[in-house]
Amino acid sequence: MNQLLSTIPPDGGWHPLIIHFPVALFPVTTLFLIGSIVWKRQRWVLMWVALALMAMGALGSYVAVVTGEDAKEHVVVTKENSDTLTQHQEAAENVWLMFTVLTAIYASMAWSIYRYPDQTKKYFVLASVVFLLCYLFVLSQLILVGHLGGTLVHKYGVYAMMR
């Protein structure tokens, strides 16, 4: 048990472990969103899987933002890395908020299609394509956040505390 506890990161060390979950979940969700538009027979399954992945990604991104704020307390902020660190933090918070809003919108879309299938059937593809375009835009913002995080690590040497 002592060995297990010794592998737990100290303060500020959780962020690099947590961040990779939403970074992986959100792009994979895109495949299920596209699949729900293309494969009519499997639409419901693909929609609910996409919604579950989005919800897990939104929750993971919230945890990543919180652990990132904790990690910021344990790094040396210099005039060289300060701007990049601030941009990374603000962009990450915006991406978390946008993905959370998109998750709520997609949940309401899925519920309305489930509740009113006849009235919403003819608008499903159009609404889904518009949603997908919005989702891809937010995904591009996630890539920017990742780039800023990578810049902090690889250019400025900002690392999380690990044992």
Image (cartoon, rainbow, N blue to C red):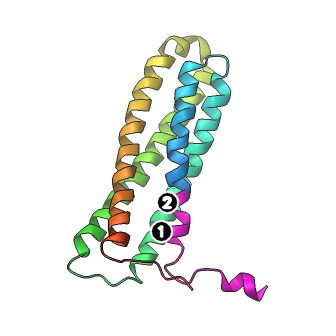
**Vertical order, 58 against 117 (above or below):** below
Q: Amino acid at mark 1?
A: Val
x then y, percent, for residue 22? 52, 54
x then y, percent, for residue 63? 52, 63
Task: Estimate how packed mark 2 is, as few (under 14), some (14 to 19) or many (20 or more) residues with alpha carbons within 10 Å.
Answer: many
**Vertical order, 145 against 30 (above or below):** below
Q: Is residue 113 magenta?
A: no
Q: What secondary structure is marked by label 1?
A: helix
Is 96 positioned to the left or the right of 25 in the image?
left
How far apart marks 1 and 2 lie (CA) works out to 6 Å
Tag 1 residue:
66
Please identify the quarter of the rendering in which residue 50 is found. top right
Is residue 72 among the parts visible in the rendering?
yes
Q: Are marks 1 and 2 in contact (CB under 8 Å)?
A: yes
Furthest residue in direction bottom, as rendered = 2
**Which image quarter holds the C terminus?**
bottom right
- Bounds of the magenta segment: 1-20
Task: Estimate how packed mark 1 is, as few (under 14), some (14 to 19) or many (20 or more) residues with alpha carbons within 10 Å.
Answer: some
Is 32 positioned to the left or the right of 91 in the image?
right
Is residue 89 among the parts visible in the rendering?
no
Tag 2 residue:
62
Task: Determine the residue positioned at 57% across, 26% down.
Answer: 35
Please identify the quarter of the rendering in which residue 70 is found. bottom left
Q: Amino acid at mark 2?
A: Tyr
Furthest residue in direction left, as rendered = 79
Please identify the quarter of the rendering in which residue 136 is found. top left
Task: Determine the residue positioned at 25% across, 82% down.
Answer: 78
Q: Is residue 19 magenta?
A: yes
Which residue occupies the foreground of this view, 160 or 63? 160
